[in-house]
Amino acid sequence: MLLAMIRLGLSAVLVTVLAPGVLGQTPQEHEQHHPGTTPSNTTPADSTALNASPAAMTSAMPSGGMMEMMGSMTTPSAPPLYPSLMAVPDLTPEQRAEFERAANERMIAGSALMSTALERLAGATQSGDGPAMQEAAVQLRNGQAQFESGLATRRALRESRASREIALDWFRRELELPLNSSVRPHGLFGLSWFHYFTMFILSAFVVTTVGMYWRRMQRAEALVARLAGGQDTAVAAVDKTPLPAVAQTLPTPNVPSSKSNSWTGLLRVVRTFQETPTVKTFRMMDLQSGELPFRYQPGQFLTVTAAPDGTPLKRSYTIASTPTQREFCEITLKREDRGAVSRFLHDRINEGDTLQVTAPSGKFTFTGVEASSVVLIAGGVGITPMMSVLRYLTARSWPGDIYLFYAVRDRAEVIYREELEYLQRRHANFHLTIVAEHAESAEWPYATGRITPELLTSSVAELPSRRVHLCGPPAMMDALKALLLGLGVPAAQIRTEVFAGKEPRSIALNTLPAADTKVAVVTFASSRRTAMMPPTKTVLEAAEDVGVDIEYSCRIGTCGVCRTKLLSGTVTMDVEDGLEPGDKANNVILACQAKATGDITIDA
């Protein structure tokens, strides 16, 4: 009921706007809807005015049957005006005016019919007369149809459209077909460039949203991985207490390092082995217990970042396991009384904790393709790179001769003794010689004292033709290298590796050197900082004094991680193994080895 009243109000407004000259029903219309009541002011001329319009229209049109198609403008069942327009290819101005007048009358008649229907519907509703309510509803719909057809025709005529097009639009609307079908689609799938542009923008938005979600999930997974070991930092303490200072300075876990050959991330310590009273092995695996996230060669090392006192420190340790084992890697290190990181690892890292690792690094490698045989000479914990080579070659059944000379202070310091003896029994091409400086038992089956020229020449035939790898304390390395050169071994066939990582220094920045000491000034161009450089200080140490970040790993000039550009001045370097071919020509230096001969400028 309310909907019908609203429609009636809208219809009245439209009639007022579109037909301002018509303000009420004609006497004939009133007589039609209210039989038996004829207003006193109705005249015969008025009763024929509306019916004359169709006759006049018919006489002006080519088709004489238009009157029957249009019907009476005042009857509820009058047909729409649109079919009669199909018979007129082009309307003249007079014909358009006639159709427009007929459309206005149709609108007025429809409004009157709806008004009468509403009155009947209201009365039938109050009396509860069902059939009368149904008849009133039918009359209301017929009135609405008349009004809408007249209104649509009038709008179409006002737009000066062709009569055939007006009629076709009506048929399309009746059959629920799309309008303007005469416009052919263009472009792929009939879409316009606006549609393509809109779809492109929406697609870009979706891709960007998905990408942001994917990156957010990756970061969340990395965070979960960091927390999986029970800690928030790269290195766990015994009480699992997070170290905020470390978390802010350590790189994001499980991402490639800035070095093209390195990976930085977290590994979990799954097993620890007490090799000797002062030496422990740490076996590490990926957090997801899959394959290691990096590959390495036998003899390379990794770098552990730890924060014993809240300040991140980096130390390098040789990977002692074989690269043929892809699920874990092992490092073996001695607990040094002055070693901040080694003490931290020995005392506070347990199975289940995680360590931040950068790997691999180093060129002290042997895979079996470099020579047909190899002589390995190790001292103390320097056995670790030799163990990786030995495990790798025997695991692959390498046919060449392997000679291992292992020097220790006493029998209690022999690392991997059981495994070494097992490999000797199992592989005929592996020749083991252990030398203890102090043999406390007569049951010691190996040599005593030190490695001598006689021991080398008696154990290795044609020694000058062999490739030799040395690793141990610096004093031992220097002595053995001179010994080998004296035995005729070419310097090009001798490979060395020394671990001499430096411990943190407690230096007051405002402490001046002695007056007679020549002090250079180093300028770090990118950081816009300067530092004093006495003759004994390296560029890396000077950078640490003033808070300039230069990446490093081994601190002994072999890994090459601290390679940086020298912009001006000259430096000296004791070790240059970490430089690549062409580095010196391009003024690339090793920060951990470079000492200034005068004022210098560094790109850092």
Image (tube, rainbow, N blue to C red):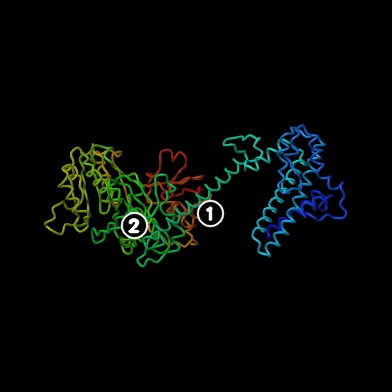
Residue 215 percent across, percent down from the top left: 48, 51
Q: Nearer the viewer, residue 43 or 7?
A: 43
Q: Nearer the viewer, residue 129 or 79?
A: 129
Considering every residue shown, the one lying at the far left of the view is 442
Q: Which residue is mark 1?
A: 529
Q: Quadrant of residue 240?
A: bottom left
Q: Nearer the viewer, residue 184 or 247?
A: 184
Q: Which residue is mark 2?
A: 268
Q: Amino acid at mark 1?
A: Arg
Residue 588 percent across, percent down from the top left: 45, 43
Q: Quadrant of residue 331?
A: bottom left
Residue 268 percent across, percent down from the top left: 34, 57
The answer to whether the residues at label 1 and label 2 have Cβ atoms under 8 Å apart is no
Q: Amino acid at mark 2?
A: Arg
| In this picture, residue 114 sits left or right of residue 27 | left
- The local secondary structure at tag 2 comes to strand
- The crowding category of the residue bearing disc 2, from other C-alpha atoms within 10 Å (few below 14, some 14 to 19, many at least 20), is many
| In this picture, residue 54 sits left or right of residue 221 | right
- Image position of 505 with respect to 20: above or below: below
